[in-house]
Every structure is written in structure tokens, then in C-alpha cells.
Amino acid sequence: MSEDYYERLVDEDALAAYLEDHLGSVDDYAVERHEEGHSNETLYVTWGDQDLVIRRPPPGETADTAHDVLREYRVTNALVETDVPVPEPLLACEDHDVIGSDFYVMEQLEGDVLRLEEPDRFADPASRERIGEELVDTLASIHDVDYEAVGLGEFGHPEGYTERQVERWGQQLMWAFDVTVEEREVPALYEVGSWLQEHCPEEHPHTLVHGDYKLDNVMYGPDESPELVGVFDWEMATLGDPRADLGWMLSYWRDAKDPEPTVPELTATFMEREGYPTRRELVDRWEAGTGYEFEHERFYRALAVYKLAALGEMFFRRYLEGNSDDPMYPKMEDRVPALANRAMRIIEGDEPL
């Protein structure tokens, strides 16, 4: 990471002054950027004997709703007393004079985020099965939240959510295409978008939805047995269609029968090993836990991959404009067309559940 980019992310002196005002004076202070994320920026902060995490959007122009960190703060604050495990949010700041953007501060949890490999202590069939069960059970618990009771009754408009998702992600693509079309075009995404519009379910259950629920957005605690201790990255959360959450989670989950990943740099394959539940088993468990059926599964899975492609194209635009130094972003020139082809395979039944 360039020093210039880091300075665009955080003014350490201004941040220290803000934290001192709200949390008191300390002798030990350090800031470190978390390198794994590809959307909002995450900073680890040592503040005396407290380990904190700061979430802020990337610098530069962003699409309208893609990086709303204060939305994250609001939903996690509402969920602290529920069955959904979240890190405790501590502070929210709208004053851009501090670090140049909205941001919020939360506690740092202890454990492992399973990105491209499983921890050695979980490398057995029983632990692997539990990883999948904890993942889908926690998703079911999100969909079971009484959002009115926890103060999120005005958090979104669940009616018509799925139709709006198709429209919104199409708009995000158009935002990205304004710049990326100069490099190359992705005509298959227009075809996918048209199919999604034609096959969008007219009705769906109304629940709290995470919007980005997947294995590497949760943390398992440090114990020998897998226990999911935190759900992160709530920037896309709203009230909407739980089946969209499930389809998104499944788009990242690998079965042993699957073709090669379309985005190998971001695709974990360890869940192909013995013990991990299949996608079908995860769906069955979610249906049993929520009482909902995963109807229109090709639509929801294709929508998930369409959204992945839109995100990739937005990343590619930011790279072209010089608003990110993430080495993943330039690779989207080829990865987005591959995602478009994957969405078409799902639509045509060539990549079954």
C-alpha cells in the first residue's frame, strides 16, 4: 500500500484526538490497515488496552448505497441484544474533518475468519460439518429477528425488495460501465439482467437481510469446536427477501462437483473436503430453521452472481480512476466476463444447486 493511499484513509493525529475525546487518554496508540477486505476499508486500532476496529468507505467517488458504514453501525447496535452474534459498536462519526469520511468504531473480536483455508483445529469431518451448520443457522437467526422489536421497523421497505435488487444492481453496473466500457464490454450481463427482470418473484417473505452474508464475513471463536462468534460487514443490510441472502451465501459455497472457480483469487475451495455440507444440505437446514422454502432457486443464485459481477465492475472502475490500490481490482477486467458466463450457466441449468 502506498503511503499516499494510507494518508487518504486516515489522519492519525485527528483520529487520536477524536478517540481521546470519547474514550479518554491513553499512552499506547497504533493504527494498522486490514489488507483482506475488498470493499469498505477496515483499520485496526490499539487504544491503550482496547483493541478496536474502524470501518470507513474507500476514498473517491462511490456508488450511492454501496459503502454506508453508518448503516452498519445502526444495525449492529440494534442486534447486540439478539441471538445474532455481532461485535459491539462503540462510536459513530459523521464529521468528515476527522478522517475524511463517515466511520464507526467497534470492539475487536478474537477468532478466525475462514478465507482461503480452514484452521488446523477444524480440519476434521465433524468440525467441518459444524462450520457449515453454524453458518446457515446464524443466517436463519438473522432472518428470524423481530425487526420491529429491536428498533429496525423503519430500516427498509421489504415490499418489492427483490425487484429493486435487480434494478439497483443494474444501475450499479451502468455506473461502472460509464468508465469501463472504454476498456472492454460485457454483453452477457445485459442478457442476465433481462432474464432476472423477467423471472423476478412477485412475492417473498419480509425479514431482516444481511446483504453480504458469506463464510468470510463471519468469525469462528478460538475454541477447538467451531462456534460462530461474530457477523461482520452489514453495510448492505436492510429489510427484504431472505432468499436473496441464501442465494448469495450459496454463490460462494463450493461443492466437490463444481467447475473451476470463476474468480480463483477470491474463492475458497476447502469446503469441497469431506465433512462440509453440500449446498443442498445447507438449503435443507435453512428451510427447516426458518420455515421458508427456497423457491425460484435459479433466480436467486443467478441474481447473486449478477451482483458479484456488478461489484467486480465497480471495483474495475475505481481501479481505472485511481481510487484504489487493491491488486484485485485490475483483475476484474477478465473476472467479470467469467462471472457473467457463470450466471448464464445457472440460468440455463448447467450449474445446478
Image (tube, helix red, strand yellow):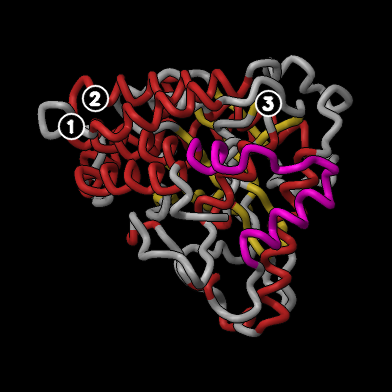
Residue 75 x/y as whole percent = 69, 31
Quadrant position of the C terminus in the picture? bottom right
Q: Which residue is mark 2?
A: 177
Q: Is residue 114 above or below residue 353?
A: below
The answer to whether residue 166 is visible is yes
Q: Residue at x 65, y 78 (%)?
A: 275
Which residue in the protein does label 3 denote?
240
Q: Residue at x 67, y 82 (%)?
A: 125
For marks 3 and 1, the one nearer the N-term is: 1
The residue indicated by pointer 1 is: 185
Q: Amino acid at mark 3?
A: Gly
Q: Residue at x 58, y 49 (%)?
A: 249
Helix, strand or loop at mark 1: loop
Is residue 322 toward the left or the right of residue 346 in the image? left
- In this view, the residue in front, 291 or 168, is 291
- Foreground disc of the pair 1, 2: 1
The picture places residue 143, in percent across and down from the top left corner, at 77, 38
Q: Relative to 316, is 28 above or below?
A: below
